[in-house]
Amino acid sequence: MIPRARGSWRQARWNEPLVYELGSPNNSGFICPYSNEDAELERVLSTTPEEKLGRMLRDRAPEIPGLSEIEVTRHFMRLSQMSYGVDVGPVPLGSCTMKYNPKISEDIARDPRIRYLHPYQDPDTVQGLLEMLYLLERWLAELTGMDRCSLQTPAGAAGELAGALMIRKYFMDRGEDRDEMLIPDSAHGTNPASAAMAGFKVVRIPTSENGTVDMEALDAALSERTAGIMLTNPNTLGIFEDRILEIADKLHSIGALLYYDGANLNGIMGIVRPGDMGFDIIHLNIHKTFGAPHGGGGPGAGVVCARGELVDYLPRPLIAKKGNRYYWDYECEKCIGRIRMFYGNIVPLIKAFIYIAMLGGDGLREAAIQSVINTNYFIALIRGVDGYDLPYDPKRPRKHELVLSAKPLKQETGVTAEDVAKALLDRGLHAPTIYFPLIVDEALMIEFTESEPRRQIEEYAAALREIAREARHNPSAFKQLPKNTSVGRLDNVYANHPRSVTPTFRILRRRLQGEQLSL
Amino acid sequence: MRLPWAPAANEKDRREMLRRIGVDDAMELYKDIPREIVLEKPPGIGFGRQLSEWELRRIVDSMLRKNKVYTDPPPFLGGSVCFHTIPAVVDAIVSRSEFYTAYTPYQPEINQGLLQAFFEYQSLIADLLEMDVVNVSMYDWSTAAAEAILAAMRVTRRRKVVVAGNIHPERMDVVKTWLLGKNASIQIVDFCRETGRVDLEQLGNIVDNNTAAVYVEVPNFFGVIEDSVDAIAEAAHKRKALFIVGVEPLSLGIVRPPGSYGADIVVGDAQPLGLGLNYGGPYLGIFAMRWDRKLVRQMPGRLIGLTKTIDGKEYGFTMILQTREQHIRREKATSNITSNEALMAVAAAAYIVLLGGGGLRELARSIWLRSHYAAKRLAELEGVESPLFNGEFFKEFVARFPKPYHTIHKMLLEKGVLGGLPLADKPPLMDYYSALFCVTEAHSMKDIDKLVEAIGEAL
Ligand SMILES: Cc1ncc(COP(=O)(O)O)c(C=O)c1O
């Protein structure tokens, strides 16, 4: 081994000013195309926008700084160096499936034969792209055991909204007045939020001691008002709902429907299908399971799929094929309409096409298995480490993710899950998801996916072990962490206080001019 | 089998990991799944086997070859999405994988760069719109409009919404879908067949004390700039309804910003700001509000704010007002949105500062001149009404031809020209003879002459 610099990891720290402090409205790094023609155009038109716009003319240029290209480049390059994604190190955020994003996908996504296509171009001029989307739709339907999929939904949550609206419309058409949606207390916040947006009352179903849906509570909740249940399986504890077939029977027997939140598909793809579990409508998170990047929050893509009668309710248009020709099918007798404009977030969808094409069915299954091995290997490494425990049936294998509780550590030392997260950041490791699911105190929700090398998983376990040890020696030091990131721990009270909250430079400008602004 | 993007699958590692877990076979980790639904073998999807990069490239290439790309001249298709130039530096910035492989910055200290870029996006859009609070993004213009209406219904506790009948038809569809579960009543205001503008008198009559919001687009679907925005604002505010305006951001280089005429909520799409066409997405839904406690508490989506370190010594950025959001508020959240279009916000921010306020004005002017030149040249052709509406327009305009437009469109395609958007099946016009053209900075006078000439030959 070659000798290396001693000391800890340090993130870049540029003290980079805001663009407002760097540029001035009179500067620009942009040369407007064909600007040599503008004078000629004014002559031919014998008028100007200033003349014609009248009272709708903006009286002066926007108060926006301009920068030269080199300044723009440096500014954002420095900002990128103060950012952290999967290409920098592990981002084991549970529920987020932060897997590696293949470079070939980025490469292909920039192909002008995708980028320069206008959504209203004649379908005959985009047959190649439609073919890819068609195959993707078929593959996803096959992988999940559903009949048809709509590629329209731009994210998982939009898929949930579509699904909830489909359920609503389905019962409306049948003249049934069902207004309750059952949702486990371990569910992601988007589930109840989506149900509420579709006009449902949310009925919370508790989790049993072994980490799955409490069947007695479920029975008690079922009634003629029940429209359906929204479930993810494996659930957010990483535990497979082993009584899923029973649950499906219970709901179907009273005429209610099952919605599947596909955010947690990664550990079971190619092994078991939501369609076979009895789900009627599902969504998939293309940016989680199928290798499209998260982009610092988006764009992702959702896909919503349905079985049987529910296919009629899917958002339109659907990708279709007649003979050798691909086209968009707008036929919508019962459908909920459109969830967004056009056909979907095409770029992430193409990345999913590439991901599936390169892995094939066997490869997807292999990826699922590897992700589950990684989860359980990590559990084996962390088991018995003082300070953390694995609530809900610790002997039972987890699937794509696991949820530790740092409650023992907090009770013993006062160091919280958030402090543990900051201590991980200080070691150059991204923190897990914390405080979710809500049913676990001091939750640390960890998902390595198939992408993390064994060595990295071991390093992560070692870091958590070391953190627990340090917490016992010097708990107060934790409140000052992180120290090695580009900025130290941030003040949430100041950030959100009505008299200091500052969401834009426009507000900052006014505050600096001495205005008292309160929100 | 070797997984291309997962390193741990070598035999020895796997054996050792399984031993440590305490199982002999990985499938033992799945034994809690009911036997009858476990697949015997994985579905035969993909191309029946694993592919190398090279094989994949060739397959993709053979497919993409069937797509037709129009760059000479660039497309004249309108419909809210137009062909614009993308500065190379914008691509370079969003290709930084520290940005694009990151998740939503839940841990602000390690993602200050992303957060600052988002804050800058919010700030730049705020100054463009002259609005105070802008979120990191909605999915697109249509879902932003739907969320704005939902927010207005919560703020006012009213259920009636008044929507201009000349907004983009797909946005109208989306709004209807999103309101399916809300018991809302959507009232559509007619537009004037001469100007293409919303019928102000009718609007005034429809807005009442049950109205949550009035939604108009400036420019509207026809590219026409509504010029009675002050009166519409007054009509809405008189009844304590919110005024929601949809905008095309580049137009604001020369067109009055909605903040200056009383908009309460502004929505739009950043697609023209360096995001490309991509056959319909991803784009970025702009969402902005006035500085008003009651409004901002109902804001959907992620917001970034300036803050200090706990020792008070330094500034930094973090997500703010999160108690509005689904992960905390669940069924009482202002929206279900979590993943959004954040990377597109970085692109838009880079694009906007590359231009600067002056550059934006210059660009908007140039687009105005070019689109007017095209409309004027088309009008010189016999029997062509161009623009069909006499309301002042920006970038897009409707032209009406003496024969069904789709036959003209076909002949243009044969000449390699992607013409206007046929309006035969597009509400609210539904006219076989009309098309919606979009002319941008990407079109030279020569390109426009070529279009006009080709149409002339097709007539
Ligand atoms: C379990 C679960 N469900 C739903 C979602 C929502 O998906 P999206 O972020 O794509 O809207 C997420 C992720 O955010 C999730 O983890």
Image (cartoon, grey):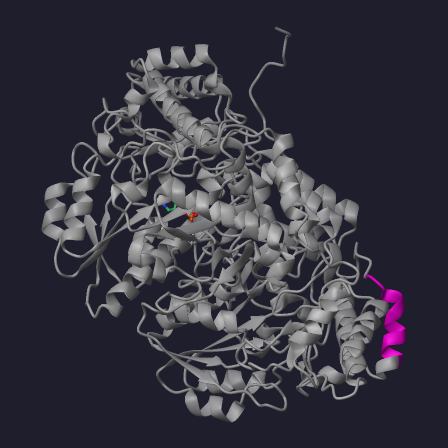
Residue A505 seen in the current view: no
Residue B371 included in the magenta stretch of the image: no
Residue A470 or residue A58, whichever sits in front: A58
Residue ranking furthest to the top: A1
> On the rendered image, what quadrant is the N terminus of chain A found in?
top right
Residue A418 or residue A494, whichever sits in front: A418
A430 vs A288: above or below: above
Q: Is residue A39 left or right of residue A501?
A: right
Q: Is residue A127 left or right of residue A67?
A: left
Instruction: Tell me which residue sits at (36%, 42%) in the image.
Output: A144
A96 vs A474: above or below: below
Residue B350 or residue A362, whichever sits in front: A362
Q: Is residue A40 left or right of residue B143?
A: right
Q: Position of residue A471 (x, y in %)?
A: 36, 22
B103 vs A382: above or below: below
Instruction: Tell me which residue sits at (37%, 22%) in the image.
Output: A373
Instruction: Tell me which residue sits at (65%, 56%) in the image.
Output: A117
> On the rendered image, what quadrant is the C terminus of chain A found in?
bottom left
Instruction: Tell me which residue sits at (82%, 75%) in the image.
Output: B453
Residue A36 included in the magenta stretch of the image: yes
Q: Position of residue A470 (x, y in %)?
A: 39, 19
Boundaries of the magenta span: A33-43
Principal secondary structure, stretch drawn in magenta = helix
Q: Position of residue A216 (x, y in %)?
A: 10, 43
Image-quadrant location for residue A10? top right
Q: Total number of numbered labels?
A: 0
Q: Position of residue B52 (x, y in %)?
A: 59, 28
Residue A227 seen in the current view: yes
